[in-house]
């Protein structure tokens, strides 16, 4: 069906996993905005649903009751991403992207007072830093 084909096209342009890890840029969010306008909210929402279902199924053979992969850390990042992407039709791609990074910073207990704080927050996403690793990451960043 067109829904599945268009959803696959969305996944080619916008990889939600890359947003979760801070690997993409606002440009990919802009491209997602274009696709959502072109194909409609139904395709956009189905694409997100398919991604969440895929992530929930990772490592499925190791946890037949529930999702071994979708732990607290992964799911909190995913929920934060879904919350900011809800604003896809009303906010700028830059605001959406950095709102996600700021949300992840808050979940790690990082202060967001200056632009440099957002840079550290993105670095934390890129390195998949947990709260345990944050002190070392901050010390390395601040040098």
Image (spheres, helix red, strand yellow):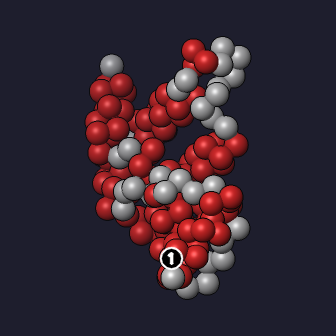
Residue in view at x 46 percent, y 58 percent:
126
Residue located beneath label 1 in the image: 141
Quarter residue 103 falls in: bottom right
Nearer-the-camera pick, 71 or 82: 71
Nearer-the-camera pick, 8 or 74: 74
**Mark 1 element type:** helix
Q: Position of residue 74 (x, y in %)?
A: 61, 43
Residue in view at x 32 percent, y 31 percent:
8
Residue 6 to residue 115: above or below:
above
User: Is residue 138 in sight in this rendering?
Assistant: yes
Nearer-the-camera pick, 87 or 132: 132
Give the left or right position of residue 70, taking residue 95 as reference: right
Residue 11 to residue 85: above or below:
above
Q: Where is residue 40 in the image (x, y as percent from the top left)?
A: 39, 42
Q: Where is residue 129 in the image (x, y as percent from the top left)?
A: 57, 57
Q: Position of residue 12 (x, y in %)?
A: 29, 39
Residue 18 to residue 62: above or below:
below
Residue in view at x 70 percent, y 67 percent:
109
Categorize mark 1 by other alpha carbons within 10 Å: few (<14), some (14-19), many (20+): few
């Amino acid at each position: 069906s067109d829904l599945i084909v268009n959803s696959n096209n969305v996944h080619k342009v916008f990889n939600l996993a890359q947003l979760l890890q801070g690997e993409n840029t606002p440009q990919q969010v802009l491209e997602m905005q274009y696709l959502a306008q072109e194909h409609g909210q139904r395709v956009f929402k189905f694409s997100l649903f398919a991604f969440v279902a895929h992530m929930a199924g990772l490592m499925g053979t190791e946890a037949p009751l529930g999702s071994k992969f979708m732990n607290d850390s992964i799911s909190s990042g995913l929920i934060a991403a879904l919350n900011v992407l809800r604003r896809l039709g009303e906010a700028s791609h830059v605001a959406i992207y950095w709102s996600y990074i700021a949300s992840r910073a808050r979940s790690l207990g990082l202060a967001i007072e200056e632009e440099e704080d957002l840079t550290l927050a993105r670095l934390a996403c890129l390195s998949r830093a947990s709260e345990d690793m944050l002190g070392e990451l901050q010390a390395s960043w601040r040098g």
